[in-house]
Amino acid sequence: MLVVGLVSNIIFRDRVSSLTKEIERQRLLLNDYAMESALFLAIVDMMEIFGKDISVEETLERVTHSISNFFKNEIVLVQLFGQHFFQDIRGENIQLPQETFEEIATRPYPILINNLNSFPKYKFLEEKGISSFILAPLKGKKEEVSGVIGVFSRGSKTFSQRDLSLLRMISIPISLILENAELIEETRILSITDSLTHLYNRRHFQQYFEKILQRAREKNTPVSVAMCDIDNFKYYNDKNGHLAGDKVLKDIARLIHQSIKGSDIAARYGGEEFIIVFPETDKETAYKICDTIRKRIEEVNFQGEEFQPEGDLTISFGISQFPGDGQNCEELIRKADTALYEAKKQGRNRVVVA
């Protein structure tokens, strides 16, 4: 009887142990299903923005949000390298040193670290309370590393190889989405800029100018407009050739762009003519800026300028101001153009205010 009882106890314990293992296996299986479901939803959420005309910054924000929904309660970082440098972080701000980015860029494989205290080079993360992290590269054209995704945990979470595999799976559509967003951005820029000078083209300038005037009306602030034209440019082209003329246009456009502040806009208005709009700026201030540009251009030694009628390649300006000289774009441009004509009439290489 005692033996039968012992055998029964052993069988019972074995069954309990088997049942416990099966429950754990089912729990892990359900957890895997939940993670795969979350992964699928994250990818679907990201793919919804594929092909949409939104900025790279907005795309990056949407991507980071989707990853955050997948890795809940963790700090998520998405960063692009190079020309399109952008960064978006969900959770506490994590500033990774340049060495970490170089490690990802030069050895493009994922990193999974659970025991930070064994890696002195990641001590800066441990000091911030990070216990574990995973980093996966984003790859662009020709498999070059274009960015990185990072997930950082402050809790006791131990990242698994499965977590890393899932993050790598997410990185594939993310790379495609960001690459597409950059292409759309480049296409948009090409559509609004002049191909030679890279300033705004006339059509986009007109649209932008309307918005600036509308804000000026609402805020009751001045707006100054400057029309400028390269003096005797046809003569220069005929004497030196169109290639030399194109280089002059590009060089002068660059000087104009470098001489104005961020809120000002400059455009190629046509031929050798440029236009600049100075929001919240009166004519006196605009005059000083334009005269500085005029002097800078006068000081440049352009190829073949010694053959110009005045022995130098120069530029003339005409300036008008909202609201005194006009209430709309057409009136302001016409007044600035009249002042420019007066500058030419007075001998060129000067700034005239309407």
Image: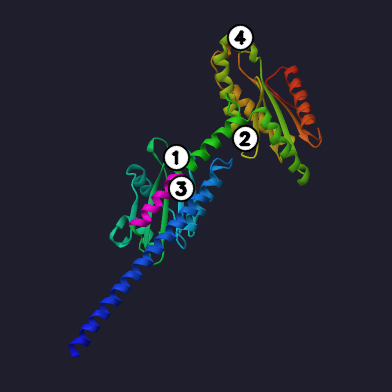
Q: Position of residue 121 (x, y in %)?
A: 32, 55
Which labelled disc corresponds to residue 289? Answer: none
Q: Earlier in the sequence, mark 2 or mark 4?
A: 4
In the image, 123 versus 155, the foreground residue is 155
Residue 156 appears in the picture as rendered:
no
Which labelled disc corresponds to residue 82? Answer: 1
Question: Callout 1: helix, strand or loop?
Answer: helix
Closer mark to the observer between disc 2 and disc 1: 1
Judge the density around disc 4: few (<14), some (14-19), many (≥20) Cα neighbours within 10 Å: few
Question: Callout 3: helix, strand or loop?
Answer: strand
How far apart, in angstroms, are the residues tagged by discs 2 and 4? Answer: 31 Å
Of the residues shown, which amino acid type is indicated by label 1?
Gly
Q: Position of residue 17 (x, y in %)?
A: 28, 75
Q: Which residue is mark 3?
A: 79
Q: Which residue is mark 2?
A: 260
Q: Earlier in the sequence, mark 3 or mark 4?
A: 3
How far apart, in angstroms, are the residues tagged by discs 2 and 1? Answer: 26 Å
Question: Callout 2: helix, strand or loop?
Answer: loop
Q: Position of residue 169 (x, y in %)?
A: 40, 49
Judge the density around disc 3: few (<14), some (14-19), many (≥20) Cα neighbours within 10 Å: many
How far apart, in angstroms, are the residues tagged by discs 4 and 1? Answer: 42 Å
Closer mark to the observer between disc 3 and disc 4: 3
Which labelled disc corresponds to residue 238? Answer: 4
Of the residues shown, which amino acid type is indicated by label 2?
Ile
**162 is within the stretch colored magenta:** yes
